[in-house]
Amino acid sequence: MLAGASHVSTQGGCSFSGLRERLREATSAAHRALDTQLSAFDLGGLAGYRRFLQASAGALLPLEVALVEAGVERMFPDWPERSRSAAIAVDLGRLGTSAASTVSVPRLTRSGVLGTMYVLEGSRLGASFLLKAVADAGDPRISEATTYLRHGAGKRLWQSFLVKLAREESGDEDEIIDSACIAFAAFEQAADRA
């Protein structure tokens, strides 16, 4: 998903080193570790898929609360369209359980919002791969609980986030990166507890 970053990207023959590349590089180890951790969940089995959703909810819920408290809608007016807390709650309800926060996250500043959104919006990129594993399971109970993984499909939410990130001039780059690392750590902790 986000791993494999380089210092410099080329586009149209021009080299540039931007915040996105620095974020990718700074979080690549955490991203790989989380991917490895999440790959241990058997998405083809009901119990494994339920644990995956519970782990995801454990971090997603408090991160989205922190975003709302930090005023994410001022930066992303389409926040209601981006938020996935309700979607994951629906899926867990279909699987006979509920969504719950399992980790604590710090308050966010404007820069922290960008770092956290980088992780949350980037996670949509992996959802298509996860959906394939879920579809291959052939269990109708699982395939009926994919609202979270399908959320935002076709809406170009990642691309519009990248536009916002590229235009951000007032953010503290170190704080943006630190917040992204904290968001990855929240998912790792939640997966440990699931």
Image (cartoon, rainbow, N blue to C red):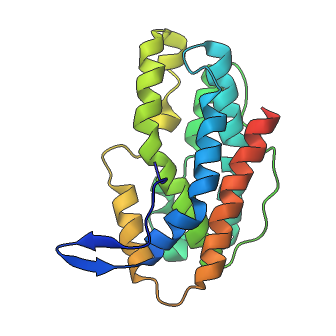
Residue at 62% over, 14% down: 46
Q: Is residue 192 above or below residue 168?
A: above
Nearer to us in this view, 113 or 119: 119
User: Which of the 4 image quarters holds residue 175?
Assistant: bottom right
Residue at 79% over, 37% down: 192
Split into 4 quadrants, where in the image is the C terminus?
A: top right
Q: Position of residue 125 (x, y in %)?
A: 42, 46
Residue most extreme to the bottom: 170
Q: Is residue 24 above or below residue 10?
A: above
Q: Position of residue 128 (x, y in %)?
A: 40, 36
Instruction: Please say whether residue 120 is visible from this viewpoint.
Output: yes
Left or right: 65, with 129 as reference point:
right
Residue most extreme to the top: 139
Residue at 53% over, 77% down: 74
Residue at 46% over, 38% down: 127
Left or right: 120, with 132 as reference point:
right
Q: Is residue 49 above or below residue 109?
A: above
Count of numbered labels shown in the rendering? 0
User: Which of the 4 image quarters holds residue 87?
Assistant: top right
Residue most extreme to the left: 12
Q: Position of residue 140 (x, y in %)?
A: 48, 10
Left or right: 78, with 109 as reference point:
left
Q: Is residue 123 above or below residue 90?
A: below
Instruction: Please say whether residue 110 is visible from this viewpoint.
Output: no
Q: Position of residue 57 (x, y in %)?
A: 68, 41
